[in-house]
Image (cartoon, coloured by chain):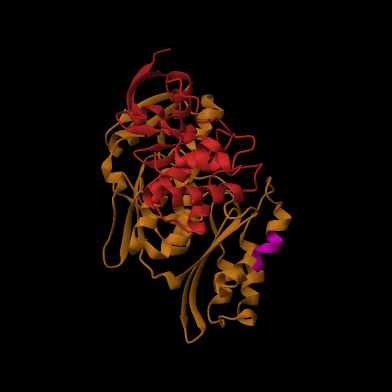
Amino acid sequence: MTRVVTVSSLAEAAAAGGAILGGGTLLMRQVNDAPQEVPELVHVNDPALRILRSDGAHWHIGAGVTMTDIIASPDCAALHPVARSIGGPALRNMASVGGNLFAPHPYGDFAVALLALGAEVIWSDGRAQDIESFLRGRDTAQGAVQALRVPKVTPDRLAYRKVSRTKPKGVSVMSVAVLLETSAGTITSARVAFGAMGPTPMRAPSAEAALRGARLDVAGVAAACDACVRDLAPVDDALASAWYRAEVAPIHLRRCLLGEV
Amino acid sequence: MPKTPVTFNLNGAETGVFVDDAQNLLEALRRGAGDLSPKFGCGQGTCGACTVLIDGVPHLSCLTLAEAVSNRNIETTGGLAGAALHPLQKAFMEGFAAQCGFCTSGMLMAAKALLDRNPRPSREDVIEAISGNLCRCTGYEPIVDAILKAAGEMRGGYAA
């Protein structure tokens, strides 16, 4: 059975060593299903985790900030479509940004956007880690995430798509987020991230390289879209096969880049 | 096994229950407080049948740690009706918005949270508000219609 430890600060939570409860949408599910897999649940009552603020260049998003909090912040407009794509209202009132970082396949759409944006993960001891290296080690990571430091962008810079089988809400067949810089119709830089296309959200460096200098139109992005599959490692699950995911990834990347319906 | 006492306000009444370690709020309500109105559907946060309001905001009670709701206000379908049915309940009944009825309790609470916040919702607002609640019988249209009808009645002063 699962033991619950309640603490009032993140530092205590990190020291406690158990699984830290965020919004509960993933951990409580595991507790309901297989309590023996979660020997200890650490419940943190630390209001600092709910702080969402921004300075000139960055959003500082506390690990406990919910998807609803993101949508309620006009300053975070670029992140609204991402937060809105996650669950229904009740789930969004619970699901936290910090928890989303640890969400296993096929979940974790918010982390996909954070990866495209080049966020930094801030640990409870103040250490900052870039999100790519964080994601590589997240399943064995020790410690507690305090917040995210995310480069601020306007909504036109971040393209995002979530592909699901059911409308309006469903689990990801894949999600795609692209941070794009263009100059006179030519792409000067791109960070491309995919969700549900590997064990964690993954970048597609081959696509990024092919996008640099390309025109932002159907012909211009074609090579990059075809290249994206090289960097991804999709798996079979109940929603789609790995084969299907790989076949349609270029199409969804194109739609995301060009804003196609 | 040791139990933890938790007190909260349930539909206006101070309520205390003893919960097992890591027990979810849905079980605490159903087994501890004897309120059988929130339903256990999936236990995974997928179906929305267990939706309750915590301090007026919809939450999935099956994924909420019971200990974490100490001193907070919980609303369930069990507390919706006063002397008469709530306009939402009436509209659901009259509009055949419930068939098997299993999703209804969660639908009603998701709808109540919407109407408490927005008395004049658009059809799109309603669809978004119940987008986390699955119904396998009705095809959703009668539910959306019923919520819009109840909203109209509540604006007209028929609120319970």
Q: Which residue is found at the position 56% from the left and 29% from the top?
A: A33
Most extreme residue toward the top is B1
Residue A53 is covered by the magenta coloring: no
Q: Nearer the viewer, residue A82 or A237?
A: A82
Q: In the rendered image, which quarter contains the C terminus of chain B?
A: top left
Q: Decide: is B11 above or below B145.
A: above
Q: Decide: is A172 above or below B76.
A: below
Q: Is residue B159 visible?
A: yes
Q: Main SS of the magenta segment?
A: helix
Residue A67 shown left or right of residue A194 in the figure: left
Q: Is residue A86 visible?
A: no
Residue A250 is covered by the magenta coloring: yes
| Chain represented in orange | A
Q: Quadrant of residue A221?
A: bottom right
Q: Nearer the viewer, residue B27 or B36?
A: B36
Q: Quadrant of residue B42?
A: top right
Q: Position of residue B44 (x, y in %)?
A: 55, 36
Q: Which residue is found at the position 42% from the left and 51% from the top?
A: A67
Q: Position of residue A107 (x, y in %)?
A: 54, 48
| Chain represented in red | B
Residue segment shown in magenta: A246-251
